[in-house]
Amino acid sequence: MTFAYLLHLATMLGINMILALSLQLTMGITGLVNLGHIAFFAIGSYTSALLTLHGMPFTGAMFVSALLAGLAGLLLGVFTQRIKADYLALATLAFSYLVHALLLNTHSFTNGPLGLANITKPIIFGFQVGANWAFLIFTTVIAVSVYLILMRLIDSPLGMALQATRDNELALRVLGKSTLKLKILAFVCSGCLAGVAGSLYAHFVTFIDPASFTIMQLIPIVCLVVLGGLGSLNGTIVATFVLILISESLRFLSLPSSLTGPLTQMIYASLLFLVLIKKPQGFFGKVSLK
Amino acid sequence: MVAGAIYALVAASFSIIYATNKFLHVAHGAVLALNTYFLYFFFTVLGLNFVLSVLLTMLAAALVGFTISKFYKQLRDKQASSATLLLGSIALMIFIDSLILLLFEGNTKTIGLLKVAQGIELFQAIITPLQISIIVLSLFVLLVLSLFIKKSRLGTTLRAVADTPEQAEILGISANQVYTASFIIGSIVATLAGILYGLEHNLAPTMGIKLVFTGFAAAVVGGIGSIQGAVLGASLFSLVENFGIWYIPSGYKDALVFIVLFLFLTLRPHGIFGFKNKIPL
């Protein structure tokens, strides 16, 4: 029982970590206040779930869901290319709501508010990843690869250009780089990775509905990115562990469930606020948001 | 029309805060909800007289506005950027929302002041006396607010800080006091909107979010900092919402607001009445 719970917790932690790392790419590294991230996650989840429900193998479905989420990133990036700071936050937020409304209302396709049930556990190259431990290994492999890819990216010339977009856009444009292209690229890659996380989520919990993809679900992820430090991948990982431990340990205080939910949220909020006051760049970050 | 009047109030209250403080105060919706719950507490739980309850709620609203501005001052003292303030605001929003859940629990509440009245027919539309009074009251508040901003001393300083905080400071206006004032006024006006909304609808902790995002959107579409713009934007939204559902499924009603907002942000970010150079683009 305890073991199963721990496995579940670790897998959810892995999925959240992938999502937070992919948000790090737009928000931390490129400095775009992206509140539309949950939409990419949702698109990934639904695509993967629908495709496998219609008989497509998991590996293909996951690939397509990353592709579609990346496409959504392209769309969002192109539409918001000239919008900055506050207005970008508002526009990306609008995008989140838009996708949520689409999921809620295309009944024939997404089954509306009832959601999709009986999503199959994945089969990868003929190997059934049904057991929770197998799923955990699979998630960990993906999380580690995402981490390594992003780590490489940060040090690559492209990563440098992305960070320069955040730090001094004008200077970069003077040097003849197209910051618009860089921003769109960040949105696309970030979308792809979030799509992968979404696909994992759908096949892990085997039931998804639009309520799992609202802005309220994005806020903890934003907390992770800010607490850990913008642009710091290690920070995000530490923050994920710390926050999950805090929120899960509250479960053992044997409080009524109507209290724990709001209390956890309040702790998140207070932590976020404290960090913003005391150390706006987060635990490990070097930059604060402009 | 009724929804439009309430949106206009929210838009105006948001606009006052945004124009002076220059960051998105997302927690505004939570503040609105919290204050409306205060009315529920005074009127329905304690059973006080309605007018007294409204006055007490206004007092509470002012207090909440004051506290919030102190909260933001902490961040501002650290030279926080508008994006950091936005994140702080998100934290505040979660905090207040959870506070409401803790204090009043999640189930919906009704204020239940008036019995549902028989509607009267006006221009081929059914309208209740309550709805008429909501519209009249909102317009009255908007008028007072607009006069206040244009004519009064505090209104002038508000506009001065909104334009150029540094110059205002040189002339001996304390920007911090003005920020606080804008939060208090914003909180009170939003609460009025919340009360009017609460008279017709049930209260839920999340009620503020929908109202405020529509209000935000209306303020952006109308042009930030302009009350006429807020009214125009809000009327546009109530029209879009209500006529839009003739053509598309009603489930998309909420999404429609965001589509319009999205289009405006990408095509005309300074709004209908706003000035191009005022927007930090």
Image: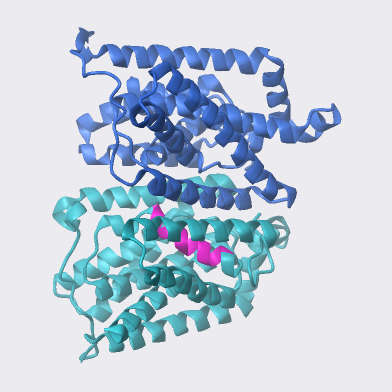
Chain colours: A cyan, B blue
Magenta residues (range): A215-226
The percent position of residue B164, horizontal first and vertical second, equals 75, 32
Query: Left or right: A199 with respect to B271?
Result: left
- Location of residue A49 by image quarter: bottom left
Query: Left or right: B271 with respect to A56?
Result: right
Answer whether residue A53 is magenta in the image.
Answer: no
The percent position of residue A102, horizontal first and vertical second, equals 27, 50
Q: Main secondary structure of the magenta part?
A: helix
| Relative height, residue A18 to residue B99 (above, below) | below
Q: Quadrant of the C terminus of chain B?
A: top right
Residue A32: tell me if it is visible: no
- Location of residue A256 by image quarter: bottom left
Q: Quadrant of the N terminus of chain B?
A: top left
Between A271 and A42, the one lying in front of the other is A271
Query: Left or right: A176 with respect to B29?
Result: right
Residue A96: tell me if it is visible: yes
The number of numbered discs placed on residues in the rendered structure image is: 0
| Relative height, residue B132 to residue A244 (above, below) | above
Name the residue: 63% across, 30% down.
B182
Name the residue: 69% across, 68% down.
A286
Name the residue: 29% across, 31% down.
B110
Name the residue: 38% across, 39% down.
B210
Answer whether residue A219 is magenta in the image.
Answer: yes
Between B275 and B120, the one lying in front of the other is B120
- Location of residue B139 by image quarter: top left
Query: Left or right: B255 with respect to A175?
Result: left
The percent position of residue B98, horizontal first and vertical second, equals 43, 50
